[in-house]
Amino acid sequence: MRIAMIGGGYVGLVSATCFAEFGLNVNVVETNPDRLNALKKGKIPIYEPGLDILVNNNIKANRLKFFDKIEEAIPECEAIFIAVGTPPRNGDGHADMTYVHQAALQIATHLKQYAVIVTKSTVPVGTSRRIAQIIRQKNPDLEFDVASNPEFLREGDAIKDCMNPDRVIIGIEKDKEDQGKKAQDVMIRLYQPLFQRETPILFTNLESAELAKYASNCFLAMKLSYVNELADLCEQVGGNIEDITKGMGLDPRIGKYFLQPGPGFGGSCFPKDTLALIRIAQEAGSPVRMIEMAAQANDARKTSMSGRIIQLCEGNVNNKTIAILGLTFKPDTDDMRESSSLPIIHRLVEEGAIIKAFDPIGNDKAKPLLPRSVQYCNSIQDAATDADALVILTEWNEFRSLSTNNLKSWMKQPLVIDLRNIYNPRVMKDQGIQYHSVGRPQK
Ligand code: UDX
């Protein structure tokens, strides 16, 4: 079976590689020439554990190929996935659909055989029907179906999530009797290896599949804003957020995952998807007020976290050296999109702080996004030396086994502000560190 993937970005490249790994022939279309040339040579433009080796294995096996033109990639393909970017549109928070619509038009111009046109990008409700309309207008005689197949993979765990997902959701057009059978057959053959693994595969109508991605991400975002506010409350009234979330998580209706407080959620999905669902719902006259509040609480959190750092530095960071450990929005990725480190560091610099930052992977991607005065370090020691405070912003594993004796000898004063709760407050205190974490008593 041969398929095409339009877009060799994060979602497109990971999905294409996993389909190839399952034995399909996959033609990836990437229009950015630098990215395309790198990919053709097996060089991966993003950091994702395990992706490199899989891409190279599948290039060698001749199953994964890269093209710059849609017309060269789509002949003989039974399914054509659209996995191009849908960044927030300037100003209004809606997803920008320009690239999706362009891809649909080009497919309509060049497709010669029946194919299912599948949307993988996260798109507003109604996009699949809009794609069908664009194709029908351009090429009225073409036989095709549209489908929506949102991707739920997490950065850093993308290969695992893609090869072994919790669920696959596929929306197809089922307006009339018998409609969608052919598309369903193609999608079943495509996902055959997962059927054998007993992964739940859910067929829905187009709109449900399009909404399912937003619904899941926004629910998780809501969970995080809730737990972050609970953590603040704990600090005021003397609770311990760790015990509370452990207790909550034992209720299977709540579940134990995604209850870690932190400096606010970031990444390429949650901030963008919450905003997009809010806009979709407002326009439909059916507002999602809980999501509006969750998004607001998250924005406010990023501001309040910089305020907290300043306050713990005796209310003034002017000319103080602050070591920052972790810049990316989460560990195991080099992605800086919507990372809490951005507003936090900008604010600290505005207040006169000298920032020494270390991220195991993200330093280079962070540079263009942070003030020029930020100094980038190559190790924890480099960042912590002569620092007045050390702030943990991303929970990279290599920060977890910090030697407190080393810290005390490197830093001007042993003040650690841990916004990811990766250390034990009692141990830190016993070892002479002034330690502050999120939502937990200090000792
Ligand atoms: C998310 C969804 O999990 C994934 O299903 C979807 O397809 C894309 O969006 P991702 O953005 O890669 O994936 O990261 P995720 O692990 O979900 O974390 C998102 C943000 O929430 C990060 O900033 C992370 O630090 C934060 N987070 C996550 C917490 O603060 N606490 C938690 O318990 C979990």
Image (cartoon, helix red, strand yellow):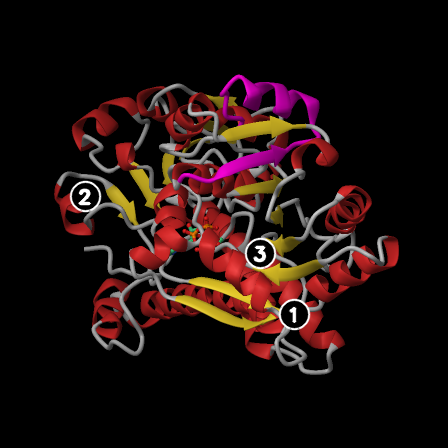
Residue 93 placement (x, y as % from top left): 72, 59
Q: Is residue 345 visible?
A: no
Nearer the observer, 284 or 41: 41
Splitting the image into 4 quarters, where does residue 118 fall?
bottom right
Residue named by callout 1:
278
Q: Is residue 353 above or below residue 167?
A: above
Q: Would residue 263 appear left or right of 102 to someone viewing this image? A: left
The magenta stretch is 23-45
User: Do labels 2 and 1 touch, CB within 8 Å?
Assistant: no
Q: Which numbered tag is attached to residue 428?
A: 2
Q: Which numbered tag is attached to residue 271?
A: 3
The residue sitting at 31% across, 73% down in the picture is 237
- Tell me if mark 2 has few (under 14), some (14-19) or many (20+) residues whose alpha carbon lies within 10 angstroms of its own: some
Q: Secondary structure at mark 1?
A: helix
Residue 301 lies in the magenta-colored region: no
Under mark 2, the amino acid is Met
